[in-house]
Image (spheres, coloured by chain):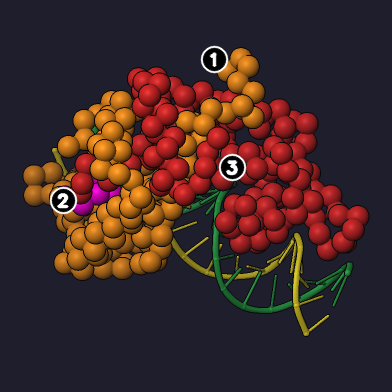
Chain colours: A red, B orange, C yellow, D green
DNA sequence: TATTGTTATACTCTATAACTATA
DNA sequence: TATAGTTATAGAGTATAACAATA
C-alpha cells in the first residue's frame, strides 16, 4: 500500500496524498472483496442505489465503454443483483435497476465502506476533519456537503 | 459496527476522502495510460527504480501472487522494460531489473505522476499543505518526510 | 441516418493448482 | 522435503469493431 509510485525527490505533501489515496482504495477493495465483488461492481451498486439509469448512462457514470458495461451487468444479473428492463418510451433503451437482493447488498456495502473510511479518521481531530473537507474541495473543485 | 449508518447520511469528511482518492487514482491511471501501461505496471516500474528484487519479493511488494507477477514481468520484458537474471547465489531465484529503456520510462513516469499530483494541490495553501501532511500521518500511521 | 445495446475478439490482470528445477 | 518460479487454466475487466433493432 505504500510501495511508491513516487519519485525520489517527491514533496512530502505529494506522498501524503498518494498514501491517503492508497488507504482509501484499500478500504474499497477490501469491502468489495468481502462479498467477492470487484471495485467496479461496488461502484456500480453504489450508483444504482438511487438511480435506474440506461446502460449508456451507467457507462457514463462509470467512465466505461458500453460494451464493458454489458459484460458487467451480465455478471451482476447472473448473481441476481440487478435486472434489465426495456424502457417503455424507447425500445432501444435498457434500464438497469437493483433487485431486492442487490439493494440489500448495496446498502450493506455502503455502510461497510462508510465505516472503513470513518475508521481511517479515528485519530483525526474534529478541526482537522473540517479542514480536510475544505482541502478536498480545493483539490476536487467540488463542494462536499 | 454498521448498525444505523444509513449511508445516505455519509459524513462530508468521508466523501471528501473518497473524492481525493479518486482524484489521485485518476492521475495514476492517466499517467500510466499515456504510455499504454496499467497502474500495476506503473507501480512495478516505480518499485524497480531503486531495487532489483526477486520475483517473490516483487510479488510481496505488489501484494500479488507470484504467478500473476510472472505474467506481468513477461509482458514488461516483451516490451523491453525489464530483464530477468538468475541469482548467482541461488539458482532458483530470478532477479528482476529495469533495462535502460525501462529506467528512462520509470524516471519519466515518476515525474509525470509527481506533476499530476502537485497540480491537484495548486489551489491548496501552504498552511493547508502542511496540515494535510499531518492529517495523512494520522490516517496512515506513518511519518511522511 | 443516428442511437442503443450486444456480440465477437483480443488483451491485461488476477488467482489456484500442478509442475520443474534447485536447495 | 521445502522453496522459487513457471505454466495451465479460468474468470473478471476493458476496449475496438461490427452488428441488429429501433428511432
Q: How many marks?
A: 3
| Along the viewing direction, whichever of B36 and B5 lies nearer the viewer | B5
User: Vertically, is B12 above or below B124?
Assistant: above
Label ID, residue B1 = 1
Q: Secondary structure at mark 3?
A: helix
Q: Is residue B78 visible?
A: yes
- A20 part of magenta stretch: no
How far separated are the C-alphas under marks 3 and 2? 34 Å
Query: Horizontal and vertical percent for residue B51?
Result: 16, 48
Q: Residues within 10 Å of mark 3 (few under 14, many from 20)?
A: some
2 or 1: mark nearer the eye: 2
* Chief secondary structure of the magenta portion: loop
Q: Determine the chain carrying the residue at label 2.
A: A
Does A67 sit left or right of C23 as displayed?
A: right
Residue positioned 13% across, 44% down in the render: B90
Residue marked by disc 3: A43
The reply to whether label 2 and label 1 mark residues of one chain is: no
Within-10-Å neighbours for mark 2: few <14, some 14–19, many 20+:
few
The residue segment tinted magenta is A3-8
**Could you tell me residue B20's position as x and y percent?**
43, 42
Where is residue A113? Give x, y as percent: 53, 29
Tell me which residue sits at (70%, 59%) in the image. A56
Can you tell which quarter of the image residue B116 is in?
A: bottom left
User: For the point 51% across and 46% down, which residue is it?
Assistant: A142
Q: Label 2: which residue?
A: A9
Q: Earlier in the sequence, mark 3 or mark 2?
A: 2
Q: Say if labels 3 and 2 share a chain.
A: yes
Q: CB under 8 Å between callouts 2 and 1? A: no
Amino acid at each position: 500500500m505504500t510501495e511508491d509510485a513516487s519519485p525520489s525527490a517527491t514533496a512530502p505533501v505529494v506522498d501524503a496524498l498518494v498514501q491517503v489515496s492508497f488507504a482509501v482504495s484499500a478500504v474499497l477493495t477490501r469491502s468489495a472483496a468481502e462479498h467477492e465483488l470487484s471495485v467496479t461492481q461496488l461502484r456500480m451498486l453504489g450508483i444504482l442505489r438511487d438511480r435506474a439509469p440506461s446502460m449508456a448512462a451507467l457507462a457514463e457514470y462509470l467512465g466505461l465503454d458500453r460494451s464493458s458495461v454489458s459484460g458487467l451487468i451480465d455478471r451482476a444479473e447472473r448473481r441476481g443483483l440487478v435486472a434489465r428492463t426495456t424502457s417503455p418510451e424507447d425500445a432501444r433503451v435498457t434500464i438497469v435497476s437493483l433487485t431486492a437482493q442487490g439493494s440489500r447488498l448495496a446498502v450493506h456495502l455502503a455502510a461497510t465502506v462508510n465505516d472503513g473510511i470513518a475508521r481511517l479518521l479515528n485519530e483525526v481531530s474534529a478541526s482537522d476533519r473540517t479542514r480536510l473537507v475544505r482541502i478536498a474541495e480545493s483539490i476536487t473543485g467540488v463542494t462536499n456537503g
